[in-house]
Amino acid sequence: MTVIYPGSFDPITNGHLDIIERCAKKFDKVIVAILNNPSKNTMFSVKERLDLIEKVLEQYDNVEIDTFTGLLIDYAKSKGVSTVIRGLRAVSDFEYELQMALMNRKLDEELETLFLMSSSKYTFLSSSIVKEVARFDGEISNIVPKIVEDAIRKKLKGDND
Ligand code: COA
């Protein structure tokens, strides 16, 4: 079975990786789908996010990285996939995720959303938190891959020039 793991990934963190690695073990193929949402103010462009994820996940043969615009249901249909994976970090994620899953199912009744509980060490993590900590020179080496840490530091240095 092939599943889609969609998100903004601005940037990918160890929390996302945890979900992807676990999915790669359980499913035949995982498509990591980066949402191209021009209205969202992101630190990394879609191309930069794609490059980072490709490097971080290069050792996985059954993980494909892609981008999409528009509705998730349309993207899933175009890939011939009817299962979406989402990670649940805390109770606070539940309402938003429930709303999205139900709306997606209303739009396409074939689409199922499966939830994986985040590993407890990453329940506090989000891409914004990582960027915030990095902005104030805090330690992020244990919450993002090295290559992502370097990319964030480079971005922040560039921004301050
Ligand atoms: N570990 C760490 N952080 C995680 C995480 C995990 N396992 N899972 C989610 N997060 C964080 C993300 O880093 C992100 O942090 P940020 O807000 O600080 O950037 C935040 O949680 C939101 O997660 P993300 O997975 O990127 O969700 P999203 O809300 O940005 O996007 C989509 C979700 C892409 C699935 C959804 O917006 C979508 O499908 N959009 C397409 C349009 C559409 O079909 N809309 C109708 C849906 S009802």
Image (spheres, rainbow, N blue to C red):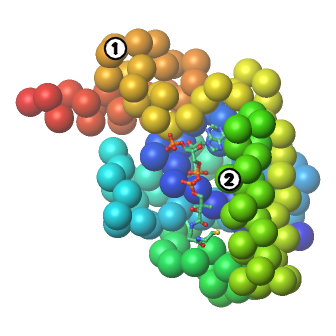
Up the image or down, 108 lies above or below 13; here it is below
Residue at x 72% of width, y 61% of height: 99
Residue 146 is labelled as: none
Query: Label 1 to label 2, Cα distance in Å?
Result: 31 Å
Type of the residue with mark 1 = Asp
Residue identified by numbered label 2: 96
Classify residue 14 by image quadrant: top right
Q: Quadrant of the C terminus?
A: top left
Up the image or down, 138 lies above or below 98; here it is above
Q: Position of residue 103 (x, y in %)?
A: 72, 72
Element under disc 1: loop
Residue identified by numbered label 1: 137
Q: Position of residue 44 (x, y in %)?
A: 35, 49
Dot 1 crowding, Cα within 10 Å, few <14, some 14–19, many 20+:
few
Dot 2 crowding, Cα within 10 Å, few <14, some 14–19, many 20+:
few
Q: Residue furthest top?
A: 138
Q: In which quarter of the image is the N terminus?
A: bottom right
Type of the residue with mark 2 = Tyr
User: Does residue 2 appear to the left or right of 52 in the view shown?
Assistant: right
How many marks the image carries: the answer is 2
User: Does residue 91 appear to the left or right of 57 in the view shown?
Assistant: right
Classify residue 144 by image quadrant: top right
Residue at x 84% of width, y 83% of height: 109
Residue at x 35% of width, y 66% of height: 38
> Ligand 1: does it lie within 8 Å of the C-beta at label 2?
yes
Q: Where is residue 75 in the image (x, y as percent from the top left)?
A: 62, 80
Query: Is residue 87 visible to us here?
Result: no
Up the image or down, 3 lies above or below 109; here it is above
Q: Position of residue 12 (x, y in %)?
A: 54, 42
Element under disc 2: helix
